[in-house]
Image: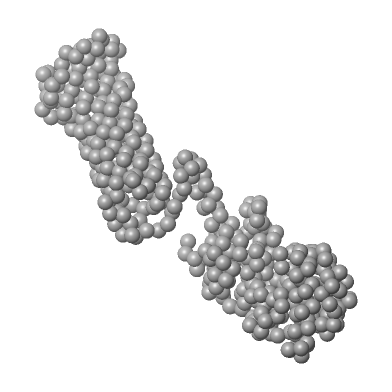
Amino acid sequence: MKLQDKYKNIIDWFNKNQGTQETELHYKTDFQLLVAVILSAQCTDKRVNLVTPALFEKFPDVFSMAKASAEEVFEFVKSVSYPNNKSKHLANMAKMVVEQFGGKIPSDVDLLQTLPGVGRKTANVMVAVLYNQPRMAVDTHVFRVARRIGLSTGKTPLQVENELVSNIPQKDIPNAHHWLILHGRYVCTARKPKCESCGIAEWCDKKMKYLQIIIMVFALNFGLNAQTYKGEEIIVGVKGGVALSSGSFVEPNNSRPEQNACYHHLGGFGGLAFRYSGEKYLAVQVEANFMQRGWRSYNDFSRTFNYVEIPLLAHAFYGAKGFRWFVNFGPEISFLVNESQWGAADTVYMSEPVKSRFDYGLLVGTGFEIHTKAGIYQLEGRYEFGFGDVFSALPSDTFRRSANRNITLTFGILFNLKKYK
């Protein structure tokens, strides 16, 4: 989903379901709001609202507080966080407002930040609440929620503020500040977010993060990096493994049809792979592999077949660095290069090259790769289904039809010749 679409959907939801919101701090004048906001730094609004009634009764305006000492103010705010610093800030702030601004709280963000205890967040709260200016105050809730749901990737409050202000319509910015605060306070909480009751969950990046965590655990705890990369990628490497083959092997003129059945054979697998990608998440892969298939009859009479197989695969992957999960799918052809027959006592009585024999079928596989500086380590499980007409030039020159099925577990070591930029 595009970032602008995400913003539109989330802002539309908040407008429809929450409308105009106000601060939860209790105040009657701009002075009282400034005092409450200073006290709320790293403290809950609920605690501040318990403290301010007695404080405002003693110091109802900026002039009365300007005459007070920090020690006098401390007695009323000692139950909030950092009471020593905050009591000094309040007393000095009141004195400065009286002396430099004639007792009037400034309405300019820059002037507000000259007051003791007033930073960018506090100044933004003041002008947004009192004058409905398009200012975004980024506190701990806004910072966490904006990054968690994917509205911002900023690493500092200022970066998050700039991203939010750039993408939210100006008329909605004052409300958006309250929406995000309340959402973080009651729904998208820090430790246990209530995703099941969240109205914007369908546009939240946290759901994707849960999926990534599941994939990471399944993939032996290797991190998933799903960044977008552009350009070409060329990968070559060697692969090896084991193949379990099964299926049917039919000789129409055979007088002992019970010998037509193909059971199971565990053989080796090895080969070379070449992969080219010019688009993100999709590549073309060609391989040349050597593979052993076989069958065993009811009386332990068996044959093994050594093939060269060439699959042409669509290679779709997710992840670009560190860990990749992938799926391979495509057609393949196989050429028989050698066939051996064994008796019940495992004695070879015929082993010779054959003139011609080929098969064709489909291959589907899935697995994961671990990309390191030294190389790429790949583990893949494959299922191959051969359904072609197979011709053989064995001594009897008989015609056979086979249905080969192979389950293959492969391990590869690959190297990047040209990486994504």
**Image spot of residue 313 (x, y percent):** 28, 44
**Image spot of residue 283 (x, y percent):** 31, 51
Identify the residue at image location x=42%, y=57%: 227
Quick check: 58 left or right of 366?
right
**Image spot of residue 300 (x, y percent):** 28, 12
**Image spot of residue 211 (x, y percent):** 51, 48
Residue lying at the far bottom of the rendered structure: 102
Viewer-nearest residue: 143 or 183 = 143
The answer to which quarter of the image holds residue 125 is bottom right
From this view, report whether residue 347 is shown above or below residue 372. Answer: above
Identify the residue at image location x=73%, y=89%: 100
Residue 75 can be seen in this image: yes
Identify the residue at image location x=86%, y=69%: 75
From this view, report whether residue 78 is shown above or below residue 404. Answer: below
The answer to which quarter of the image holds residue 244 is top left
Quadrant showing the C terminus: bottom left
The answer to which quarter of the image holds residue 31 is bottom right
Viewer-nearest residue: 238 or 118 = 118
Residue 24 can be seen in this image: no
From this view, report whether residue 307 is shown above or below residue 256. Answer: below
Residue lying at the far top of the rendered structure: 345
Quick check: 386 left or right of 118?
left
Identify the residue at image location x=70%, y=71%: 21
